[in-house]
Image: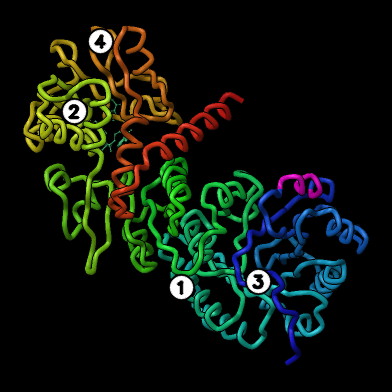
């Protein structure tokens, strides 16, 4: 076997932006958006003008890109856009290889792959993509990579659930440990976490999109997310892992605010969101990859409490958890929503002996009510479904009733613990109860924090109430999670978390204004 060109980009994980544009003008426009990228992969099969592409055009692209350029011409039999002859495809790639390319991507199953590698004028990535999860022939592909010894190996399956990534991550680990530069992960929403986990394993490349919405393959992170939010270049083998499970979580602020504190403190930790609606699969991935613990959000808060091996007092009372910490044979479940609500209210007035209505009898309402009772408040849970309020009230040792109780009884504090008013939902412009029921003397806290000023808070301000945004509770529950997950009692994460959350919410608001 001939000696192959070595992978020239070292053993650190590099960010490679994938570009799939219809023409060279559009490609060159994208070159202005590569700040933070180490390399760029041009998907020649996305071009409308492939037949007219000359060596000069390819060289021109290479010369004008701010970062080294690799070329891929994915055939239809690997779900690409090229439907021509294999000999033509090989000729295009040979031209690309002598145009100054940083690498050429060649499919492992191309009949001419071994010859191409033998004659290669530049590094070659040997790749295989499956549009299914858990491919039966994964080990054969790993074996073939061992025989071909390409400059870099890329194996990609498509995850249906997060744990589908485990075989690919294990293959990646095996290749990397054997000295073969490689990147192995899963595509798809459920595979998003594996792209980050591969980076933590020492994968040669993580493929990124120039921006959200510009993904060339399903599940790609944007360049900004990898560079600014995750600061992925700090990760190495042995970096401690924790993260977030829930569904959907693509709009969660938790990754941004956790990573902001992790960066501020210079910790060797990665906080990774695991997307997907299958709780078992998310837990499998997290425990197999040795996560220390997880933040847990909807819809898993009740189910995770049931599965925990141990629970804190609040979880045992209300049956809902928002944090888990892994231990030998399972995990401990905690709930930080309750103390966060008490602390957020205490910034405005003492809760002891205050008459407080908690609107909503779900996990957050129950946790908040129980913690307020423990803090000495006189609590009533009111809910659209009265029977559910009564059940929750029994658990939390307080009163319970229908929403109308807000009209007749007098409360010092009213807490919204329903999703009514949340941006992006059909109830975004609604309030959980008629605002005319407010006297103007109440303190009103809305647990909904997107948008920061919900319809309920706007109406409460108009009526003269003191208001507290949901963000105040959100950053406090996250700060308490941070201490549980990372066990660092000396760090005060609130300021960094608040800054990161406010920055994101402001940017989101302005992008919504566009
Ligand atoms: P959940 O378990 O699904 O409970 C939702 C509650 O809202 C239920 O009692 C439900 O009433 C009620 N509800 C739903 N739609 C309603 C409507 N259209 N009108 C009146 N009531 C309605 O949710 P959760 O986990 O408790 O969370 C509730 C909210 O708090 C969510 O928006 C969540 O994002 C937010 N939250 C914020 C923080 C924070 O830190 N700021 C922390 C935790 C949660 P029924 O019983 O009648 O269905």
- Judge whether 294 appears above or below 212 on screen: below
> Where is residue 22 shown, x and y percent of the image?
78, 49
Which mark is drawn over residue 10?
3
Looking at the image, residue 258 sits to the left or right of residue 386; the answer is right
59 vs 154: above or below: above
Disc marking residue 385: 2
Alpha carbon distance from label 1 to label 2: 45 Å
Residue 435 left/right relative to 25 = left
Quadrant position of the C terminus in the picture = top right
Give how far apart the Cα atoms at labels 4 and 2 are: 21 Å
Q: CA distance from mark 4 to mark 1?
A: 56 Å
Residue 482, x across and y down, in percent: 33, 48
Seen at 18% across and 28% down, the residue is 385
Q: Nearer the viewer, mark 3 or mark 1?
A: 3
Q: Earlier in the sequence, mark 4 or mark 1?
A: 1
Marks 2 and 3 sit apart, C-alpha to C-alpha, by 60 Å
Identify the element where label 1 is drawn.
helix
- Please report the residue visible at 30 percent of the width from the left and 47 percent of the height from the top: 481
Mark 1, residue position: 167
Res. 5 in view: yes
In the figure, 279 relative to 101: above or below?
above
Cβ at disc 2 under 8 Å from ligand 1: yes
Assess whether mark 4 and mark 3 are in contact (beta carbons under 8 angstroms). Answer: no
């Amino acid at each position: 076997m001939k000696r192959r060109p070595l992978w020239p980009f070292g053993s650190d994980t590099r960010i490679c932006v994938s570009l799939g544009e219809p023409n060279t003008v559009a490609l060159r426009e994208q070159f202005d958006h590569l700040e933070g990228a180490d390399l760029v992969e041009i998907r020649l099969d996305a071009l409308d003008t492939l037949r007219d592409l000359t060596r000069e055009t390819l060289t021109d692209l290479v010369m004008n890109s701010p970062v080294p350029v690799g070329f891929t011409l994915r055939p239809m039999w690997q779900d690409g856009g090229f439907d021509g002859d294999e000999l033509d495809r090989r000729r295009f790639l040979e031209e690309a290889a002598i145009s100054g390319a940083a690498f050429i991507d060649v499919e492992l199953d191309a009949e001419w792959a071994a010859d191409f590698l033998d004659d290669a004028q530049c590094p070659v990535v040997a790749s295989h993509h499956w549009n299914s999860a858990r491919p039966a022939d994964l080990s054969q592909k790993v074996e073939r990579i061992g025989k071909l010894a390409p400059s870099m190996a890329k194996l990609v399956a498509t995850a249906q659930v997060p744990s589908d990534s485990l075989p690919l991550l294990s293959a990646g680990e095996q290749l990397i440990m054997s000295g073969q530069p490689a990147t192995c992960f899963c595509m798809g929403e459920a595979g998003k976490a594996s792209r980050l986990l591969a980076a933590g394993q020492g994968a040669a490349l993580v493929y990124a999109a120039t921006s959200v919405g510009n993904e060339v393959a399903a599940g790609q992170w944007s360049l900004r997310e990898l560079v600014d939010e995750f600061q992925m270049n700090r990760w190495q083998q042995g970096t401690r892992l924790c993260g977030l499970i829930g569904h959907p979580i693509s709009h969660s602020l938790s990754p941004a605010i956790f990573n902001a504190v992790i960066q501020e403190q210079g910790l060797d930790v990665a906080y990774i969101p695991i997307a997907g609606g299958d709780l078992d699969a998310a837990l499998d991935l997290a425990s197999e990859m040795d996560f220390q613990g997880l933040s847990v959000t909807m819809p898993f808060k009740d189910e995770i409490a049931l599965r925990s091996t141990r629970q804190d007092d609040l979880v045992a009372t209300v049956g809902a958890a928002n944090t888990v910490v892994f231990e030998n044979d399972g995990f401990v479940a905690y709930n930080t929503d309750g103390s966060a609500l008490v602390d957020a209210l205490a910034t405005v007035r003492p809760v002891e002996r205050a008459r407080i209505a908690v609107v909503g009898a779900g996990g957050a309402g129950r946790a908040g009510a129980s913690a307020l009772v423990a803090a000495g408040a006189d609590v009533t849970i009111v809910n659209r479904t009265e029977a559910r309020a009564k059940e929750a009230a029994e658990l939390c040792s307080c009163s319970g009733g229908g929403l109308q109780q807000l009209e007749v009884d007098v409360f010092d504090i009213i807490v919204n613990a329903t999703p009514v008013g949340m941006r992006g939902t059909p109830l975004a412009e609604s309030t959980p109860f008629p605002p005319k029921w407010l006297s103007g003397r109440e303190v009103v806290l809305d647990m909904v924090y997107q948008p920061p000023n919900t319809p309920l808070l706007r109406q409460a301000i108009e009526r003269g109430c003191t208001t507290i945004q949901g963000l105040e509770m959100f950053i406090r529950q996250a700060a308490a999670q941070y201490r549980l997950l990372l066990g660092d009692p000396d760090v005060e994460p609130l300021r960094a978390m608040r800054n990161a959350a406010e920055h994101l919410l402001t940017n989101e608001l302005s992008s919504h204004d566009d």
